[in-house]
Image: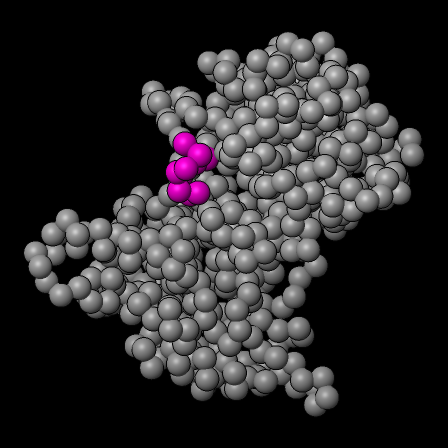
Amino acid sequence: MARFVFVTGGVVSSLGKGLASAALGALLQARGYTVRLRKLDPYLNVDPGTMSPFEHGEVFVTDDGAETDLDLGHYERFTGVAARRTDSISSGKIYSTVLEKERRGDYLGKTIQVIPHVTDEIKQFIAIGENEVDFMLCEIGGTVGDIEGLPFFEAIRQFSQEQGSGQCIFMHLTLLPFIAASGELKTKPTQHSVKELRAIGIAPDILLCRSEIEIPEKERQKLALFCNVRSEAVIAAPDLTTIYDAPLDYHHEGLDQAVLNAFQISPAPRPDLSRWKDVSERFHKAEGEIRIAVVGKYTTMEDSYKSIVEALAHGGMANRVRVSIEWIDAEIFEREEPALHLAGFHAILIPGGFGERGTEGMIKAVEFARKRKVPYFGICLGMQMAVLEVARNAAGFQDAVSEEFIPQEGSKSATYIIFHLKEWIQGNNKIERHLGDDKGGTMRLGSYRAILAKGSKVARVYGQTQIDERHRHRYEVDREYCPQLEKTGLCFSGMSPDGRLPEIVEWRDHPWFIGVQFHPELKSKPFQPHPLFADFVRAALENSRLV
């Protein structure tokens, strides 16, 4: 049976509970244990799939097609454990499930209440797969004291009581603000946060304290005394140059040992940190720098493209080079020439997105990259923009467009190169979708197989001709136009196994011009960079030597 670590937060949000959970998972793995990480979010959305990227950052997609919080990306990148649909839950999903059961009569006409019905549903979710791993790390979203988070706090309190002694511990992440005028770290906000946590029946075993500076021993002792934890369980979480230093830094601070001590595991297995030492060394000893322009729709919020940022960093590690990213709003190219903004970059990437806004600017950026032979990487929408650019400027379809950008009544004069897919095959099942379906249910989601053309650039990059990648999109390239587009020099080098869905395109007469319908960034890890990102950065590095 798994031991459970519940990770809570206090004082302010966005302190890095997801990163701390991921780093702890990596450290437990380094000691030979198996782990699984979960996120419990208190918002009422059923899942993050229909939330704006400006609201909640990117949507992370699992192999089994769940749209989840971006923290699951951290979990995968640090542990290499593929997340599942059962690793992410929200209040909205919990309440929906409870109400569905009530409608079916599962509660036999009883009055439905937060306690016990909602909390029982949360506990059942937490316990899924508890016999599969040594440690289950469960992060509770938000901060202690939030009204919407109370059912989750009550559920984990009950769960720890029911599991018995030694099976559950609580780790609380807080902020120690530094007051520059007095030159002091203030412990009072953490004391109040722990007091709030204890008031609902949870006593933290470990305090993880974010701070701008080193925590003096005096403040550690003060926190231990007033928060009723051991002094060695007060762990500093200072700001880092890179998040990939977190496992080494937390180990140095004693986090993994504090967890094992809390579970009374002795003697503790010695950790093998060679993987993370190599990752840190590759980052800190980079032998150069390349500049990559990311032309997108949500460039004012970096978390909208969190996995792409990290995948590019991983590609840099693979090539021992630092990747400098500059965000460019695609709409600017609808007013100004791309050369004014893109000249001097070593590579260009267009990521995914939804809706028409900025797409005309993206098409101009693609044209710039294709004609100037600048390495280009198009992901999801970025692939579709590459196809539309070739259709308009090379194949003569001047009215080429995506069905996504045209009102439902359509336009008889438009050439629909990109269309809304109505049905497709996933495994042995036929999936059907309609334009009028709920937004959360109209996409091709999760892992799908693709067959790569022998001798293609992508087959060389992957080193194989069959791949599995994660998807999240509603529209597809119409294969009926493939023969005409291929006459121009565009190659459809990756297709679905049944040959119906174009998955990858590349431009033959170009050093590196690849577009993919899927999201390769979701599977990249610092110790195992995705081959497409590693090779894209390699091409950018080669181009930097020519510029």
Q: In the figure, is residue 43 to the left or right of 533?
A: left
Q: Nearer the viewer, residue 409 or 519?
A: 409
In-image side of 495 versus 460 (left or right): left
Residue at position x 24%, y 62% in the image: 118
Residue furthest bottom in the image: 182
178, 222: nearer the viewer: 178
Residue lying farthest right? 547
Rendering coords of residue 7 (x, y %): 42, 64
Q: Is residue 442 magenta?
A: yes
Q: Residue at x 63, y 24 (%)?
A: 414
Quadrant placement of the C terminus: top right
Q: Is the magenta region chiefly helix, strand or loop? A: loop
Q: Which residues are magenta?
A: 434-443
Please tell me which residue lies in front, 302 or 383. Answer: 383
Residue 84 lies in quadrant: top left
**Residue 422 visible in the snapshot:** yes
Which color scheme is applied? one colour
Q: Is residue 146 above or below residue 64?
A: below
Pick whichever, 451 or 219, lies toward us. 451
List x then y, in percent, for residue 324: 78, 47
Q: Is residue 372 left or right of residue 331?
A: right
User: Residue visible at 26% across and 52% down?
Assistant: 97
Query: Is residue 114 rendered magenta in the image?
Result: no
- x and y percentages locating residue 370 in the rendered image: 79, 26
Q: Quadrant of residue 251?
A: bottom right
- With respect to residue 519, does 124 lie above or below? below
Viewer can see residue 320: no
Residue lying at 15% horizontally and 49% vertically, measured from the top left: 104
In the rendering, at what x and y percent does residue 49 appear? 46, 47
